[in-house]
Image (cartoon, rainbow, N blue to C red):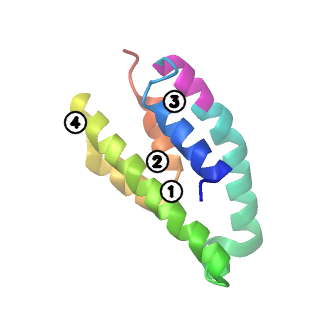
Amino acid sequence: MLTLYHVAVATCIEIIGGTYMTLKKSKILALIILIPFTLLTFLAVKDYGFIGIFKEIFKNFATIQVFIDLIIATIFILVWIWKDSKKNNRNFLIWLIITLIFGSFGPFLYIISSKEK
């Protein structure tokens, strides 16, 4: 079943890929999303701790499903980063490690730190 979440992820991938926006606009969009997401992450870690967040994920099948869905989306984003980093002579391994450790912050920082074309 196609959900609003899936449509949003697909749209973000197209935006990040430059289908609808220039690189400068995608950086602005990334910053607009990153700022409140950073606050949300801070509050979650403050309330539950880093390990506590993962304990909450595995409490029921609904949260496990969302977690697995995020892993799948992350794989798609990492494939895009891998292709883009090869094309733009950037070190993919650094962005892979950052993404695996810090989640969505990796792709956001990748977009923000990219050079203007």
- The residue located at (45%, 24%) in the rendering is 19
Mark 3 or 2: in front is 3
- Which image quadrant is residue 31 in? top right
User: Most prominent secondary structure in the magenta stretch?
Assistant: helix
Label 4 environment density (alpha carbons within 10 Å; few <14, some 14–19, many ≥20): few
Where are the magenta residues, as a range? 23-29
Q: Could one spot residue 96 in this view of the protein?
A: yes
Q: Which residue in the structure is indicated by mark 3?
A: 15
Label 2 environment density (alpha carbons within 10 Å; few <14, some 14–19, many ≥20): many
- The residue located at (22%, 36%) in the rendering is 86
Q: Which residue in the structure is indicated by mark 2?
A: 106
Gap between marks 4 and 2, in whole Å? 17 Å
Residue 112, image x, y percentages: 49, 31
Residue 53, image x, y percentages: 65, 73
Q: Which of marks 1 and 4 is nearer the N terminus?
A: 4
- The residue located at (73%, 54%) in the rendering is 40
Q: Which residue in the structure is indicated by mark 1?
A: 103
